[in-house]
């Protein structure tokens, strides 16, 4: 898991991830292995109820679809961050610098977020994490 980047305001930023690391949860591979083992070792004289088998198959499908949703949401978040960052270019931004002073300038460029870092606005040649921006206004 990546370490969050902390801005001047003390808020943590953790980049979007398309994977979930939950050692306490079964993945779809483990679920499928258990389902196959259950079918392989069932008692032929007393087979598993077909409604139970259908419920387990439906649960497997739900797990698979949830994984797809997680991946789609992570992709959408990256696109949303890119669109938002792009909209900052040409606007006047106020931010808090590392000494705590408030500074204002025009956003000339934006570096998009990556897995390791937050998006950065370049304001009058200074790189400022987007999380440190306190006000955005239209440049007159």
Image (tube, rainbow, N blue to C red):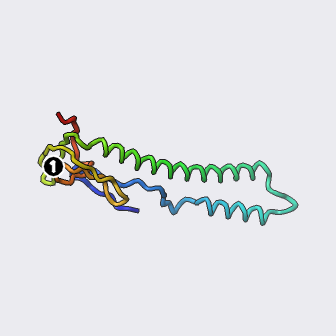
Q: Nearer the viewer, residue 132 or 88?
A: 88
Residue 102's image quarter?
Answer: top left
The answer to whether residue 12 shows anywhere in this view is no
* Quadrant in which the N terminus is drawn: bottom left
Residue at 74% in and 62% down: 38
Vertical comparison of 4 with 89: above or below: below
Residue at 65% in and 53% down: 60
Q: Position of residue 81 (x, y in %)?
A: 36, 47
42 sits to left or right of 129 = right
The answer to whether residue 21 shows anywhere in this view is yes
Vertical comparison of 31 with 83: above or below: below
Vertical comparison of 13 with 39: above or below: above
Q: Nearer the viewer, residue 104 or 41?
A: 104
What residue did someone put label 1 on? 124
120 sits to left or right of 15 = left
Residue at 36% in and 55% down: 14
Q: Position of residue 24 (x, y in %)?
A: 53, 61
49 sits to left or right of 19 = right
Q: Secondary structure at mark 1?
A: loop
120 sits to left or right of 33 = left
Q: Position of residue 55 (x, y in %)?
A: 71, 49
* Quadrant in which the C terminus is drawn: top left
Q: Nearer the viewer, residue 78 or 64?
A: 78
């Amino acid at each position: 898991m990546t370490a969050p980047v902390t801005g001047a305001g003390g808020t943590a930023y953790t980049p979007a991830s398309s994977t979930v690391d939950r050692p306490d949860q079964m993945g779809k591979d483990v679920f499928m292995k258990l389902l196959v083992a259950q079918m392989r070792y069932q008692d032929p004289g007393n087979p598993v109820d077909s409604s139970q088998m259908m419920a387990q198959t439906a649960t497997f499908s739900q797990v698979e679809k949830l994984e797809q949703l997680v991946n789609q949401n992570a992709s959408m978040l990256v696109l949303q961050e890119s669109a938002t960052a792009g909209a900052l270019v040409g606007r006047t931004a106020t931010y808090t610098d590392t000494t705590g002073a408030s500074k204002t300038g025009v956003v000339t460029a934006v570096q998009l977020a990556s897995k390791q870092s937050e998006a950065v606005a370049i304001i009058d040649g200074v790189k400022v994490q987007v999380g440190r921006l306190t006000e955005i206004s239209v440049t007159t």
